[in-house]
Image (tube, rainbow, N blue to C red):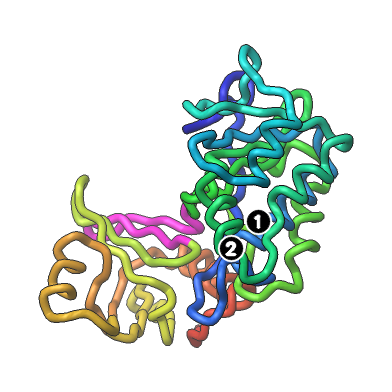
Amino acid sequence: MGLAEPFGTQEPTHQLVVRERDAIDDADPAGGLAVENRVINVSMRQATAIHLCIDDTLNADRLAHLRETLPGVEDDRVLENATPEYRAELPADADIVTTALSLPESDTAVWLDRLFGLAELAVVTDDSWLYRSVPHETHIREINAEAVEAYLRTLHRELSDIPGTAIVPHGPLASWHTDGYRYELTWDALRERRNEDQWRSISLERLRRVKSEPERSEIVFQWDLPTGGSRVVRGLRRAFGREADISPMRVSIATAEVATVLDALEDLNGRLGYEYEIIE
């Protein structure tokens, strides 16, 4: 997976994130694939082409139409993927792509084709990439905000009415070292590394209260305990670092870094609709 040269030298600046909620399906207007389609449509208006790697082993009518309509790419591939690559010229082929990627209600087959039949895609200009995605890998929704002026602002405006959705900087929103540990705040978790090989992670879905204690150079996190699963399952979560059963949790942090962490948490709370309280 990845981008071929010269596009591969341009690192992502941001990523599209969508909270998974039980009441929201992927194809709903606020669901992951429907939101991504809106981002793709905005990106195509700023671009000269979109490259799509399509799994030709799936018998998907809409994707088959793309294969039959769009020219294949051999020597000038944009995507480093083993599946066949096709190029849609923009704006001429925009409607063809939009129709193929759309998600009719209650059509599970189309949803599966969109999720798995489309192996990878990249929206590009002549000399840069704007948006790249691996649909079945929800953490790969990458944005190059430096490619086109006002591109990022346009994306923010497009998604402003969709709850549980945001465009955040690529990578950790804050990171720091203390007491021999490394901490990272991402858009969906607080992560702690005890050594080179072991991370433990606590989902922000469980966060209920954050309080800064500058006189002690600490932030106190109050978490709900994980729900569901047997004692064995909960033990495996702890053993493999997927969840941490800690409530409350005191984390040492330099005074100068407290504001960065609290600002990031407040921004996530507002834009993604988490329900934790922040006390400064």
Q: Residue at x 50, y 84 (%)?
A: 278
Q: Is residue 112 left or right of residue 255?
A: right
- Measured as percent of width and height from the top left, residue 114 is found at 59, 51
Give the percent coordinates (x, y) of residue 17.
57, 60
Task: Check residue 36 in the rendering and tell me which mark sits there, or answer none.
Answer: 1
Magenta-drawn segment:
170-186
Determine whether 84 is above or below 210 in the image. above
Magenta run includes residue 171:
yes
Quadrant of the image occupied by residue 219: bottom left
What residue do we see at 73% from left, 33% from top? Answer: 124
Q: Amino acid at mark 1?
A: Glu
Q: Nearer the viewer, residue 264 or 214?
A: 264
Asked whether the beta carbons under mark 1 and mark 2 sit within 8 Å of each other, the answer is yes
- Extreme residue toward the top, this view: 75
Place of residue 67 in the rendered image (x, y in percent of width and height, measured from the top left): 67, 32
Residue pictured at 35% horizontal, 74% vertical: 218
User: Mark 2 = which residue?
Assistant: 32
Amino acid carrying mark 2 in the image = Gly
What SS does tag 1 mark? Answer: helix
Q: Which mark is residue 143?
A: none
Q: Is residue 218 magenta?
A: no
Q: Is residue 206 above or below residue 35?
A: below
Q: Position of residue 45 (x, y in %)?
A: 84, 44
At label 1, counting other C-alpha atoms closer than 10 Å, the crowd grade (few under 14, some 14-19, many 20 or more) is many
Residues 15 and 67: in front is 67
